Each structure stands twice: as C-alpha cells, then as structure tokens.
Image: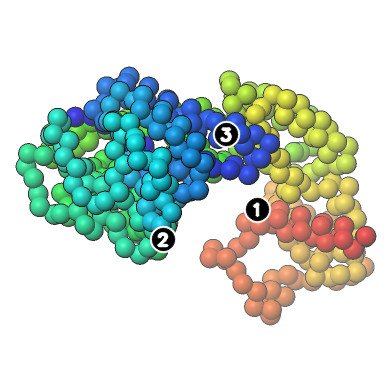
Amino acid sequence: MRFLHTADWQIGMKADHVAEVAERVREARLEAIDAIGRAASEHKVDFVLVAGDVFEHNQVGRQCARDVLRRLGTFPVDVYMIPGNHDHAGAGSIYSTGVFQQVPPNVHVLLEPQPIAINRVNTVLFPCPVKQKRTMSDPTEWIPAEPSDNTIRIGLAHGSVSDRGFGDFTDNPISLAAVGAKHLDYLALGHWHSAVQFSPRACYSGTPETTKHSERDSGNVLVVSIDRPGAEPQITPVRVGRLKWLEVDYELSEPLLDSLDGLRSKLGELSEDPSNTLVRLKLTGVSTSEILLTIDDLVDDLKSTYLHVDVDLAGLVPGTAVDKLYEWAQTRPLARAVLADLRRILCPQGYDETAATEETDAGSPMTDLASVAAEAKLPEDEDGRITQEEAQAALIEMLKALEGLER
C-alpha cells in the first residue's frame, strides 16, 4: 500500500512579507496542488492524505475554495483531508459553507473523529480534525488502542509536538506516544512547515510550497509505502514546490570594491531559475557611503533578475566612523576599555594592547574592563564569555550611538 502525505497548503495567504510579488506567491500555492496530483499519478499512490490547513483561514473567498475543489477533483485517487488550526471546523468554518455541500466524489472532508475504512488496501484511517484554533487537548486521544493484526492503521492529525520543541502545550499538542499506544503504522502530521521525521512512523510532511525564508526543509510531499500491518514504512520525499527562498549572508571586507565583485559573482550563481527565486541578502562588515550607493545599484540589477530581493544592511559598520569613535572615546575611560576589549575579541591574532592604548589616548590611564564588570556584577552568557558576533554587534551599536551624538 502506498499513499501521499501532505499538509499546510495555506491557500489564500496574503504574503504581506513579500507584498510586491504576493500575487505570484499565492498563485504558486495553487499550482502546487496540481503538482501534488501529478506526483500522486507518477508514484502510483492509492490515496492522498492532507493533514490540515488547506486554507490560510476560514474567511477565504468562496471562489478560491471552489478552485481548490476543482483541482482536487482531477486527482487520479481519493483525497482525505482534515481541518487544521488555520481552517478549523469551529463556528464559521469554511467547511460549513455551501461550497462544501457538493464536493468531487473523490474528495473526502473528514470533520468528525471516527474511523474510515479504505477496504481496497486493507487500511483504517483515524482522522483527528481540529475543532478550535488552540487547545490543550491531544487530538489523537480518541483513537482506539485495540491492536489489529490484519489492518494497516494510519493516524491523520494536525498540531504541535511540544515535547520535541515544535509548538507549545496550548497548540493542539500531539503526543508521539500515540504511535505505540494506539498501534499506528503511521501518523501523518500537519502544522510544521518544514518536513520533520520523528521516526519512520511519525512525520510532518511540511508545506508543499515554501511560505518564507526560515522554512529550511519545505516544498515537498512524502510518499509513504507500507507493505503490511506492522511493517516499517518507507518514506520518500518528492519535490513539488516551484519557488525557491534563498538566504545569503555576506561579509564585506577590504578592499571593498573587490569584495563587492565577489558578492556580485556569488549572487549571479544562486539559482538556475531566478524568475522563481526570492532572495534575502544580509550584509555585514564595513561600508562607506560610496559603497552603499554601489550596493543600491547592485540590488536594482538583482530585482530585474530575481522574483524578489530583500536586503538587510543593519550589520554594516560605517567605515569612516571608526576613527571618530576612538576620538570620542579619548575622554571616556570605560568606552576606551570596551573598545580595547572588543578589538581583542575581534582581532585575537597579532593584537598589541600597548599600541591599542596609545591609539585611543596615551595621556589617560587604561580602565580595566574586567574589574569594572566584576564590580558592576554584569550578567554573563552561559559560557562566561563574549562571542565574536556579540562583539561585532556591540561595536555597531557604539557607532550608531556616536552617529546620534554627532547629530
């Protein structure tokens, strides 16, 4: 027996975080439904399971809901779907509207927790529809625990797995202990947008079309094969998503023009399908006003190539302000000590503390930052030390403070 496991389609999402191309992002989610149908045919599955959140919310347009049903009606096999927390089966549910009074014969919207026999493949499905957006009740609790030696048992649920760090205990918490306690051959989960395999018997499929940059392992469906009751499932991820959401972290360094050339080359090799690629570029390091203008031009070029480009410049240190920062710190012993310690952290190789002291102000005594920190009882991180990233962030904040003082 073989089936396709998917979830979290989020049809009707606004995509405000990429407002300029929101319509294309919404369109891609509808196209993903067709891709799932093709995958069902290519992999010769017996049925398709949708573990909740077909829709972003219960107020989606009725025409949008009809479009989803029309596409599902073209699938070569039966589709079994449950409501999730976004499209829960409570008051005002999209599933209670007239749109769902007549659905294609192969589409089964499961609104009640009761066993569904799929006799053709000797399988019993245990749907766990979500009735409210948040609850502390485990939706799998109702599943009977009676073992069966001759029937494949599959749970279909939507919610968090809080004991593993996926959501919290008020977010329709699902206990993975249900797999063993309820004698399930497989638990098809929805809610988490990246694919997660807790075991061969319990998986989040992830969303079939990536929603945002932080979803590291999304854009797939899972094809699950189970030979017989009790046999370990064989799970195969299948790519169906069209859009690519790429993150690029890049540090600018001297010489800056050469560094920019390296960035331009890296960005040019990002994707073979740039028209369907959304890029988030995070820049760190040193910059000048001239370099910022060059970056603006580079971003304009990128926007003509990629579907969407988002640039984060918060990590750039204005290079021309460093000398001013040392000048400002000359009459401020604690600030000078902070700078010296930051330099020691950021440049541990070849650090000359005497030269650093002279560089700030040879006429004033150097404050011992360690003793100042001890007297002030400043909090430390769990390792008792400052990291490179924290030091860089502190330097950036000092430069921003200096900029404010100059104004």
Circle 2 sits on which residue?
Answer: 134
CA separation, marks 1 and 3? 34 Å
Q: Earlier in the sequence, mark 3 or mark 2?
A: 3
Which secondary structure, mark 3? helix
Q: Position of 162 compared to 18: left or right?
A: left
Q: Dividing the image into 4 quarters, which one contains the N terminus?
A: top left
Relative to residue 339, is residue 259 depicted above or below?
above
Is residue 219 shown to the viewer in this render? no
In the image, what residue occupies the spot 31% across and 42% down?
109
Q: Is the residue under label 2 in contact with that under label 3 (CB below 8 Å)?
A: no
Q: Where does the image place residue 250, in percent across and percent down from the top left? A: 68, 38
Q: Where does the image place residue 254, in percent across and percent down from the top left? A: 79, 37
In the image, what residue occupies the spot 53% across and 65% down?
382
Tell me the kind of residue under disc 3: Val
Which secondary structure, mark 1? helix
Q: Earlier in the sequence, mark 1 or mark 3?
A: 3
Crowding near the residue tagged with mark 2, few <14, some 14–19, many ≥20 C-alpha atoms within 10 Å: some
* Residue nearest the observer in this picture, 387 or 118: 118
Extreme residue in the bottom direction: 375
Is residue 269 shown to the viewer in this render? yes
* Residue nearest the observer in this picture, 30 or 236: 30
Q: Nearer the viewer, mark 1 or mark 3?
A: 3
Circle 1 sits on which residue?
Answer: 389
Relative to residue 340, is residue 32 depicted above or below?
above
Circle 3 sits on which residue?
Answer: 25
